[in-house]
Amino acid sequence: MLIYIKNMVCLRCKMAVQSVLEGLRIEYTSIELGRVNLPTALLPEQQDKLAEGLQHYQLELMENKKQILTEQIKVTIMELFATPGQEMLLKLSEHLCNQFPYDYTYLSNIFSETEGTTIERFYITYRIERVKELMLYESLTIKEISYRLNFSSVAHLSHQFKKVTGQTPATFRKLCANEDFVWRTCE
């Protein structure tokens, strides 16, 4: 049985889910971004306790099919950036249509309805968040990041970065060097 969890988008979130499941002695076979595979269905009281435990980590169980599809789209986009240097050979819309049994218009409408933003805006924003991570944690140059995240050029990366954040990558890097800097993601 699959259960879907909203906002489970990082390793820390997976560890939180694992901790809650183990604390409640709920068996699982796998934990992946956005979902948990269970060998058996949950009893109603187990589901309530799991939902309560997840709230502590700002995570929530999802039952709404539109929300589940939206989270699956987000995870699919995030996985595009999981492998360094993986070249995206298809347009985003084609890639998503290959992953889901729906046409892109339907996926786009569901995503916009549940998230209040477009798939493209989410993709761009998430991509810029990855740029920030690579600058901050891996100290890569803009050229290296541009290559790794398949931007068409350094200028394109810089333009998108400024459009999303309001500052250049160089300004962001200087802010990161400040001892008082606290990075907040755009969730």
Image (cartoon, grey):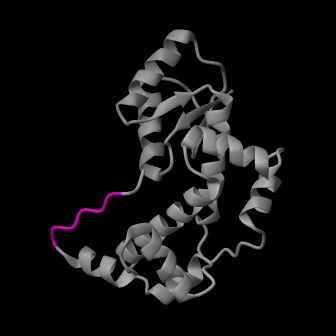
Q: Main secondary structure of the magenta part?
A: loop
Q: Name the residue located 39 percent from the left edge and 77 percent from the top edge.
A: 135
Q: Name the residue located 32 percent from the left edge and 58 percent from the top edge.
A: 184
Residue 94 among those drawn in magenta: no
Find residue 149 and report its horizontal and vertical position in percent: 58, 75
Find residue 90 and report its horizontal and vertical position in percent: 78, 69
Q: Name the residue located 62 percent from the left edge and 60 percent from the top edge.
A: 120
Residue furthest to the left: 180
Magenta region, residue range: 179-184
Viewer-closest of 181 and 125: 125
Find residue 76 and report its horizontal and vertical position in percent: 66, 54
Residue 182 as seen in the image, left or right of residue 22: left
Viewer-closest of 140 and 162: 162
Find residue 161 and report its horizontal and vertical position in percent: 46, 74
Q: Quadrant of residue 19?
A: top left
Q: Is residue 186 above or below residue 51?
A: below
Q: Is residue 60 above or below residue 92?
A: above
The total number of labels drawn is 0
Quarter of the picture holding the N terminus:
top right
Q: Is residue 179 above or below residue 110?
A: below
Q: Name the residue located 39 percent from the left edge and 68 percent from the top edge.
A: 165
